[in-house]
Amino acid sequence: QVQLVESGGDLVQPGGSLRLSCGAFGFTFGLYDMSWYRQAPGKDREFVAVVNINQITGYADSVKGRFTVSRDNGKNTVSLQMTSLKAADTAVYYCNARHYLNTNSAYWGQGTQVTVSS
């Protein structure tokens, strides 16, 4: 059974840090580009960061320099280290897996809530 399970969401103060993790089950992790997306209340889901099968990373401009995405193919996990958090980063964060060749093969996690507030 294919599953992506996110964890690590929490309430954090502005300027703080948080690390999200996503565990992957039921598919060949090493063949999938792994991404993080987020969705704030009343807004569309938006891209945050990606790490592809070759460990090449990419980021949305809004998080560049503050967030770091990484993957561990031995543990089938992808992480998102978030620093200098702002209220604007408040959202549900979703893990996404997409096959590096067949983009129709894609999976989503259930999401984890990140709230940045004092």
Image: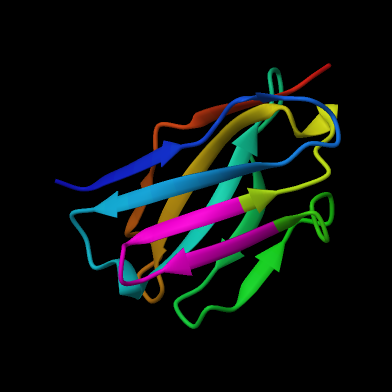
Residue at 76% in and 47% down: 83
Which color mode does the image show? rainbow
Residue occupying the point 63% across, 72% down: 57
Image height of 49 relative to 4, above or below: below
Q: Nearer the viewer, residue 87 or 12?
A: 12
Q: How many marks?
A: 0
* Quarter of the figure with the C terminus: top right
The residue under the point 41% across, 74% down is: 100
Left or right for 117, reference 18: right
Can residue 40 be seen by looking at this rendering?
A: yes
Q: Which residues are magenta?
A: 68-80
Q: Where does the image place residue 117, in percent across and percent down from the top left? A: 80, 19
Q: Can residue 45 be spotted in the picture?
A: no
Give the residue at the far left of this rendering.
Answer: 1
Main SS, magenta residues = strand
Q: Nearer the viewer, residue 86 or 108?
A: 86
